[in-house]
Image (spheres, rainbow, N blue to C red):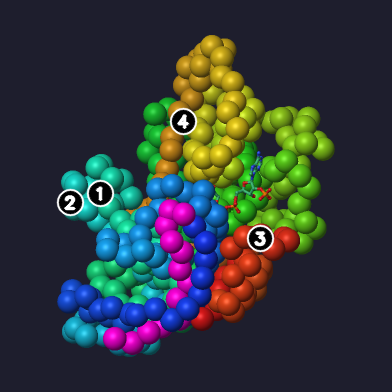
């Protein structure tokens, strides 16, 4: 069996190492992938720090290859395919189905018994390695080879596309649009300023919302400039509390996972407002909720919805957004990738580079 350079941890304890690990090919695996880029996110850092107790190694192994955001190239294909060929750029899906009804229809993002696996997170080796074997069924083709510099954003963006699918369903419970049936003058606030916050804000701009991102500290000038390029306003809610609370919001999206901040901004929601909970932080301090908060939600018909992961359809739509944005924003789109490092830079797992939006490893 050949060995390939891999980044791995010992889940759920944590730690991070790079080294040559054996590459196994299972009988059902009909494609060999060469990894071009891996995206690094909060989940990878959480696994490495040992903060994510739900992470676990593949059965029978004491280590887990990490990484779930990637752009790959088909290196070898072992089966006839009308859709794929050697050299195609592809994005592998993260979640792999169990046997529940949602998993059986390709909606393992809505798995109803928890019996799915996630590459690089729960019981399945991930994508932070030079090569791996997979099944064509779990690949999404990048439609345009010119997207090589930005297609690694497909995985984080697919979460956002699903978040907006949840919004689309919920917003039907009342007339949500304005009298022209558009979202003009509707306001969306996004808590947090990381990669997911930027991508949520960009899709909200697409919908026609006026979008504000908030954080509890000033933002690096460079990040403010990038936000402006995409039509997104930023407010530091500590230095400008009045500005942050000045307007009612119709859609609130949280990427911080901080209950105190969420409840603070929940109070800015207008009638029929929607809160999408996306950020996770099991270590965030508790916050107090009283009866008047509950009354507020009820009297305004406010909906609170959690949203996790996404399905193949959302990867495909994410690629459509990226293709369109590359046309609309040109080179500015690649500014979302704020760092591009060789995989040996393991310190990236324990420190966020200043001004980070998305850090990637180039294999
Ligand atoms: P990230 O860069 O760590 O984003 C979190 C953002 O929240 C950061 O900008 C952080 O600010 C900000 N933040 C933290 N506490 C805050 C507070 N009290 N007020 C305002 N902002 C605050 O990670 P990401 O990759 O964009 O992901 C965002 C979150 O979604 C993470 O929690 C991640 O685990 C989660 N996630 C969820 C799913 C899902 O399917 N639901 C999928 C992927 C990721 P600073 O770092 O600047 O201080
Ligand atoms: Zn399932």
Residue occupied by mark 1: 115
What label does residue 351 carry, if any?
3
Mark 1 residue CB less than 8 A from any atom of ligand 2: yes
Residue 20 visible, this angle: yes
Between the residue at mark 2 and the residue at mark 1, the CA separation in whole angstroms equals 7 Å
Residue occupied by mark 4: 304
Between the residue at mark 3 and the residue at mark 4, the CA separation in whole angstroms equals 32 Å
First reached walking from the N terminus: tag 1 or tag 4: 1
Estimate the x, y position of residue 286 in percent, counting from the top left: 58, 28
Task: Please determine whether, in this image, residue 140 is positioned above or below residue 44.
Answer: below
Task: Count residues near mark 1 (Cα–Cα under 10 Å), then give few for <14, some for 14-19, many for 20+.
Answer: few
The segment highlighted magenta reads 1-13
Judged by its main secondary structure, the magenta piece is: strand
Q: Nearer the viewer, residue 178 or 7?
A: 7
Of discs 4 and 2, which sits in the foreground? 2
Task: Please determine whether, in this image, residue 61 is positioned above or below residue 21.
Answer: above
Marks 2 and 1 close (CB-CB < 8 Å): yes
Task: Please determine whether, in this image, residue 145 is positioned above or below residue 275.
Answer: below
Q: Which quadrant would the N terminus be assigned to in this image?
A: bottom left
For the point 27% across and 53% down, which residue is it? Answer: 116
Between the residue at mark 3 and the residue at mark 2, the CA separation in whole angstroms equals 38 Å
For the point 51% across and 43% down, which residue is it? Answer: 280
Q: Quadrant of residue 349?
A: bottom right
Q: Quadrant of residue 171?
A: top left
Q: Report if residue 358 lies within the magenta region.
A: no
First reached walking from the N terminus: tag 4 or tag 2: 2
Of discs 3 and 2, which sits in the foreground? 3
């Amino acid at each position: 069996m050949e060995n390939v350079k891999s980044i791995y941890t010992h889940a759920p304890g944590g730690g991070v190492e790079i080294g040559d690990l054996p590459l196994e090919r299972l009988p059902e695996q009909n494609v060999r992938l060469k990894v071009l880029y891996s995206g690094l996110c909060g989940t990878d850092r959480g696994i490495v720090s040992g903060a994510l107790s739900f992470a676990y190694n593949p059965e029978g192994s004491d280590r887990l290859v990490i990484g779930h955001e990637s752009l790959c190239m088909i290196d070898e294909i072992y089966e006839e395919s009308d859709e794929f060929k050697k050299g195609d750029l592809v994005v592998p899906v993260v979640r792999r189905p169990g046997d529940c009804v949602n998993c059986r229809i390709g909606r393992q993002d809505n798995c109803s018994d928890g019996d799915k696996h996630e590459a690089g997170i729960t019981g399945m080796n991930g994508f932070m390695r030079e090569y791996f074997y997979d099944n064509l069924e779990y690949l999404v083709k990048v439609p345009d080879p010119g997207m090589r510099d930005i297609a690694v954003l497909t995985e984080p963006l697919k979460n956002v596309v699903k978040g907006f699918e949840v919004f689309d369903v919920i917003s039907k419970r009342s007339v949500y649009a304005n009298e022209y049936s558009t979202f003009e003058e509707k306001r969306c606030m996004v808590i947090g300023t990381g990669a997911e916050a930027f991508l949520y804000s960009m899709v909200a701009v697409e919908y026609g919302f006026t979008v504000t991102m908030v954080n509890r500290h000033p933002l690096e000038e460079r990040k403010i400039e990038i936000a402006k390029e995409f039509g997104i306003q930023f407010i530091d809610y500590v230095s400008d509390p009045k500005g942050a609370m000045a307007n009612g919001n119709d859609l609130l999206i949280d990427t911080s996972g901080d209950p105190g901040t969420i409840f603070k901004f929940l109070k800015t929601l207008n009638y029929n407002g929607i809160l999408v909970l996306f950020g996770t932080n099991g270590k965030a301090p508790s916050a107090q909720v009283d009866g008047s908060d509950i009354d507020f939600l009820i009297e305004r018909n406010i909906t609170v919805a959690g949203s996790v992961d996404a399905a193949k359809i959302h990867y495909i739509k994410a690629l459509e957004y990226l293709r369109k944005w590359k046309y609309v924003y040109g080179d500015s789109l690649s500014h979302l990738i704020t760092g591009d490092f060789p995989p040996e830079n393991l310190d990236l797992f324990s420190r966020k580079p200043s001004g980070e939006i998305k850090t990637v490893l180039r294999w």
